[in-house]
Each structure stands twice: as C-alpha cells, then as structure tokens.
Image (spheres, helix red, strand yellow):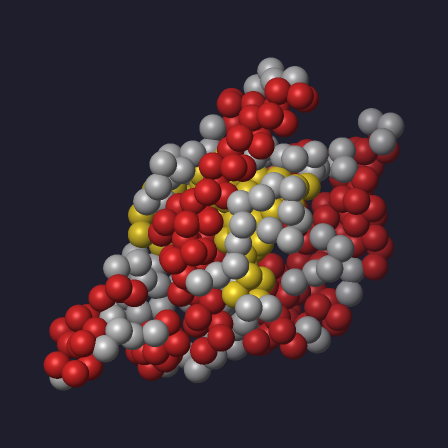
C-alpha cells in the first residue's frame, strides 16, 4: 500500500479508475468527461464564476438529467446581457475582446496543468475563433488530435431565470476506499461536484430546438436531449413562441437563414440516425419510443421553421 501511495498516478490510470467505478467501458469518452469537468470547475472557481451561465448538453447531463449520454464540449452564455446595452459596434467589439481574453487566460492555465494544447491568442484560429460578429467565440483546446470545444455566447436573449445547480461526475455515487482517495487525491480534488449557475431546462430546450433549425450538420444527441426533456414533462410545443423569438434573433446572419431554409425542406431523420459517432456517445440505449418521437418532432420542426420563414418574409428579409 505504501509503495502505491508514494507513486504519482497518471491521468490514464485515473481514467481507468473512473471506468471501473462507473462501469462505463468507453475510456476515451470517460477521459473527455474528466477533462471538461476540470475546465468547468476552474471556470466556476475563478473570477469568471459570476459572469457566465453553464448551458447545453453537458449542462443537461451533469446538472439535470444524469449521464444518459456523454458530452464532448462545454457551452456558456454571458450572464448580464444589460452589459452590452447601448454600446456602439466599435465599443462592443472592444469589450467582447476584453472578456474573451479574460476567459482565455483561465483556459490557458487549466490547459497547461492538464497537458492540453491551448494558447490564449485571439489572432490564431487554431485556438480562438469568433463568430456571429464577435458575439460568439469558440475556444479550441487540443488533447493530441482530439478537439475540446468551449463555446461562449456573449449576446443572447434569455427567457427564463438561471438556476444555481450542482454539476456532477460519473463517480458521485461510487464507493471509493480511503486508499483510493489518498492515491487519486490530486484528481479527486477537481473531479467532484461543483456548484454552477446554469440555464434552466426550459432555456436549454429552446436553444436545442434553435440549434437543430439553424445547424448545417445535425447531431443525434440534440434530438435525444429534447426527447429526454419531454420525458421530464417539457414538450417543445409548449415553448413554440420562445423558440421562434430565439431563432429570429440569429436570422440576421446569412448562414443561419440558409440553414433554416434547407432544414425546413430537406431535414432527414434517417441520415441523423446513421451517424456512428453520435451513437457511440449514448450510455443508455435509446428506447423504441424515441423513434416514434422523432417522427412527431420532425413535423413540429417543419411547422416552427415555416412560421419563422413567413415572419422573415413579412419583414422583408
């Protein structure tokens, strides 16, 4: 026992420990969960913690619904939208660049400790890429050839109150011995539940539907997330108005208008179901009712999409 305690464990050894304790055999996705949880913990342990809201699929899995699937990236929104009110384009861009730099600094420190490749360089698209007129930024961290995306939306219309919640790990309910705690202490310092400020489930639902409507390449995980939310009693039909308003906010960008047009006409459920990478991410196999849900939900998507296009046409876009 003493010999084991004197030896410093590697990340790969901790990954195998989590694989064993969680009984989930996909070690590469377990490793990804460990890495993104460390990033999440560092963000909400830093001066950034009061400025950002955790959201997206990772938030659903870690904070609300449990590990029915893996998530491979992190998404955040700037909390206080009044910050950007009445700022001209030049001043807004300057402020967004400043906040991007602060966020990137925290990521750079975390990446260094994890042995992950990232540089806080806003001019290098290999690490930092802006979108939506600098209102959104994607930070790219590289674990070898594996990309970990951390995306921040600075400007976003919010309809529901955010909530303080706990972001959990794969081993929260596992039995861990004192010896294991001592041996893996450096990893267990961060791979534990962390308090975050997050989107409500309702807000996540609305953004998930918007993502499907405006995305060029569909992801099966988005559809399954909405299915899981419906099982929680949140049907997308009940939030049609909020979804339309959220989606209209991004219609100023040509690529989203084009994607919406194409998705209304050609969205293929069969193609989405055939993606092997997406299927690999599921921890719990989708039940047969999920496939019935897909047929009904695709009709709702078409209805919402057509409604938005009619509104855009009326407004002369």
Q: Is residue 227 above or below residue 315?
A: below
The N terminus sits in image quarter: bottom left
Residue 81 left/right relative to 190: right
* Residue sitting at x 17%, y 71%: 182
Residue 284 left/right relative to 302: left
Residue 13 in view (yes/no): yes
- In the image, residue 184 lies at what x, y percent? 25, 71
Nearer to us in this view, 106 or 278: 106
* Residue sitting at x 58%, y 54%: 140
Q: Is residue 3 above or below residue 167?
A: below
- In the image, residue 158 lies at what x, y percent? 54, 34
Residue 230 in view (yes/no): no
- In the image, residue 173 lies at what x, y percent? 26, 69
- In the image, residue 83 lies at what x, y percent? 51, 23
Residue 291 left/right relative to 167: right
The C terminus sits in image quarter: top right
Q: Is residue 85 above or below residue 221?
A: above
* Residue sitting at x 54%, y 37%: 100
* Residue sitting at x 65%, y 35%: 134
Q: Quadrant of residue 180?
A: bottom left
Nearer to us in this view, 228 or 15: 15
């Amino acid at each position: 026992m003493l010999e084991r305690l004197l030896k410093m464990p590697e990340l790969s050894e901790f990954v195998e420990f989590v694989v064993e304790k969680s009984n989930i055999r996909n070690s590469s996705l377990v490793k990804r969960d460990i890495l993104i949880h460390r990033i999440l913990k560092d963000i909400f342990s830093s001066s950034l913690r009061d400025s950002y809201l955790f959201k997206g699929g990772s938030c659903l899995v870690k904070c609300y619904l449990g590990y029915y699937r893996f998530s491979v990236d992190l998404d955040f929104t700037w909390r206080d939208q009044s910050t950007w009110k009445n700022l001209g384009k030049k001043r807004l861009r300057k402020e967004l660049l400043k906040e991007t730099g602060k966020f990137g600094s925290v990521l750079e420190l975390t990446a260094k400790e994890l042995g992950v490749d990232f540089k806080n360089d806003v001019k290098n698209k290999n690490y930092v890429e802006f979108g939506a007129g600098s209102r959104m930024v994607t930070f790219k961290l590289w674990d070898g050839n594996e990309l970990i995306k951390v995306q921040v939306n600075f400007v976003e219309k919010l309809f529901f109150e955010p909530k303080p919640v706990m972001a959990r790990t794969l081993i929260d309910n596992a039995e861990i011995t004192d010896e294991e705690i001592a041996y893996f202490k450096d990893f267990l310092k961060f791979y534990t539940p962390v308090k975050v400020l997050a989107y409500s489930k309702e807000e996540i639902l609305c953004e998930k539907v918007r993502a499907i409507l405006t995305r060029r390449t569909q992801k099966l995980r988005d559809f399954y997330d909405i299915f899981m939310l419906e099982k929680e009693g949140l049907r997308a039909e009940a939030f049609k108005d909020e979804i339309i308003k959220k989606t209209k906010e991004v219609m100023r960008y040509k690529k989203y208008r084009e994607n919406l047009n194409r998705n209304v006409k050609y969205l293929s459920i069969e193609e989405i179901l055939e993606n092997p990478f997406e299927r690999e991410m599921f921890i719990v196999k989708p039940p047969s009712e999920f496939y019935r849900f897909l047929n009904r939900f695709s009709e709702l998507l078409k209805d919402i999409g057509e409604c938005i296009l009619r509104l855009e046409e009326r407004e002369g876009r």
